[in-house]
Amino acid sequence: MNELTLSSKRILAHAYHIMVSAKRDAFRLFDVTLWPLVLFLSMTLFAGTFTTDPRTTGIVVLGALGWRIIYHFQMEAVQLYMDNYWMGMIEHVMISPVRWWEFILGGAISAVGKIAVIALLFLGLGHLVFHFTVTNWGATLIGFLACAGCGLVLAVISMGVSFLKRGDAFAFIFAFPDAIAVLSGVFYPVTVFPAPVRLLAETLPTTHAFDLLKATLGMAEWQPLRYLATLAVWLVLAVLFTSWALRRARRQGRLVKMK
Amino acid sequence: MHAVVARNVSKTFRGKRPVAALTGVNLAIREGEIYGLLGPNGAGKTTLITILIGLTTQDQGTVEVCGLDIQRHLHEVQRQVNLVRGFSGVLEKFTTWELLTYYALLYGVPRSRVEEVMALTGISGKRDAQVALFSSGWRQRFFIAKGIINRPKVLFMDEPTVGLDVDAALAVRDIISDLNRQGCTILLTTHYMREAEELCDRISLIAEGRIVAEGTAAALKDQVKDEEAILISGQLDPQLRVQLGQVPGVLGVTQDETGCRLLVRDHGAMRPVLRSLLDSKAILESIKFDEPSLEDVFLKLTQRGLEQGDE
């Protein structure tokens, strides 16, 4: 069996692991049902109270869905790693010939499944309750893919933090994307920020990913190159960070929970 | 041919209080042998294992497993080794089959291997039961099944019988012997002297991060052939134990849950030991001479018992 086949099996192993966990855990099923629904209805009903502009409903629907895509692409791999860590099984996983990026790709497979459910929920309800319809499916899918790319970059960073901080990693893993969400202008243009903050926002791939979604509603310019450029820079930095973090964690004996 | 070679391996965990976990450790495990690593808690056994399996990097020295340098060929080595350890946690809500399938996929082995390892370890009947709900004996069988899923050339077993009742421990020892007969090299850490003597071809004694002795159980015990061991049943006051340790001719004192063990130079030390015990008015159940054991070798070399921690 060649390395590519073996690697594919390890990626599938992680996706399988997440699927079994989700199947047995009602709380994790809420992740694709109750929590997104609460978020979606809170925001759309709030927006609908103040305006009848369909673009406002549109940006809320697409923005909320875009952010769920980022969340799941980031969290699936990290949660898988932390599950094994908390349950005292991490050394049994890390002793196998697993690579760190295989956690992320396994998580991405699971994320695609969960996002499919959430997308049906958001777009279906958006259409039924608020008469929202996606007008340009091609461009909208590209916008969602852009969000997935941002989620993968955040997953890479979060894996590095998990290697280093172990049980304490979750504080950062939750807080960092939230800070980025504010700066990325998910539901508003980043022009609302003062110049220095706006400059910072422009360096984030998430800002440009949400601009791609807003562009499908005529609320921003369609600039995929800006997105790709910032994503490439963040991806390179994230990979360098996580490779360093793994080496450091190995030096410090942080890949095990053995006493 | 050696399955595992460690040369001059040292490891210090840095921090506010740096801890020198290993200092200049050398060991060479031959292919096909069961090699025991004995030492008290905190002696460095687990750190050494995590270095040998590539999960921690050493500060100095080199490690070769299956003929490959572990730092340069980590993934090639990881395909050929596996780990079983006592007191391992387990993911909740996963069945035996589901967890073993996860590991089978990680190693790229066919799913039929899951059925095979369940049969080999006698857990086929628990295929659809949740591993987290297993008794410690069944759980350890599960971890052995997981440990052999990739047909490892070298299996690292960190206290595999710790916390098991007598029957479960015997069953695990039988499985270890069977695996070894099939050609698997095993590195076993344990607290149990008799287990090490029964299973291991060669044994290393480790204390404070250093290998203090190595050899067959018989050769190691030869180091205390001129000494005597006195076994005192009952709990002794710590102060009395210190006093006994200062009696001329007493080489070491150790206490476990059953009683106190003294290693003495010869019978001549018996009289002052008895005098100290009588003076202390301690309540004793029995006093007898015992066969020299690996515990006594350790006591002689380090002045401490294997059950005592280094911390």
Image (tube, coloured by chain):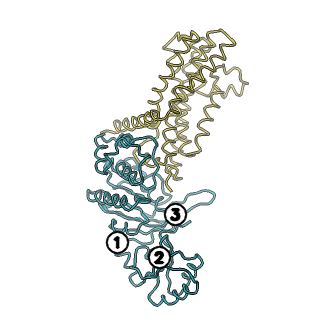
Chain colours: A yellow, B cyan
Mark 3 crowd level (few <14, some 14–19, many ≥20, 10 Å Cα): some
Residue B12 rendering spot, x and y as whole percentages:
54, 60
Cα gap from disc 2 to disc 1, whole angstroms: 16 Å
**Which chain contains the residue that carries disc 3?**
B
Secondary structure found at label 1 = loop
Q: Residue furthest left?
A: B182
Above or below: residue B145 compared with residue B296 = above
User: Regarding mark 2 in the picture, which secondary structure is present there?
Assistant: helix
Return the x and y of residue A126 as percentages of the image width and height: 56, 14
Q: How many marks?
A: 3
Write the residue at 61% across / 39% down.
A172
Q: Is residue B202 left or right of residue B309?
A: left
The amino acid on which the numbered mark 3 sits, given as a three-letter code, is Gly
- How far from the left and from the top, in percent, is residue B63? 41, 58
The tag on residue B42 is 3
Residue depicted at 54% across the width and 15% down the height: A125
Mark 3 lies on a secondary structure that is loop
CA–CA distance in space, label 2 to label 3: 17 Å
In this rendering, would A216 be left or right of A105? right
Disc with the residue nearer the chain's start (2 vs 1): 1
Amino acid at circle 1:
Thr
Instruction: Classify residue A34 as left or right of residue B301.
Output: right
Residue under pointer 1: B216
Residue type at the position of mark 2: Leu
Whether residue A235 is visible here, answered yes or no, is no
Numbered label attached to residue B301? 2
Camera-side residue of B278 and A18: B278
Q: Are marks 2 and 1 in contact (CB under 8 Å)?
A: no
Whichever of labels 1 and 3 marks the residue nearer the N terminus, that label is 3
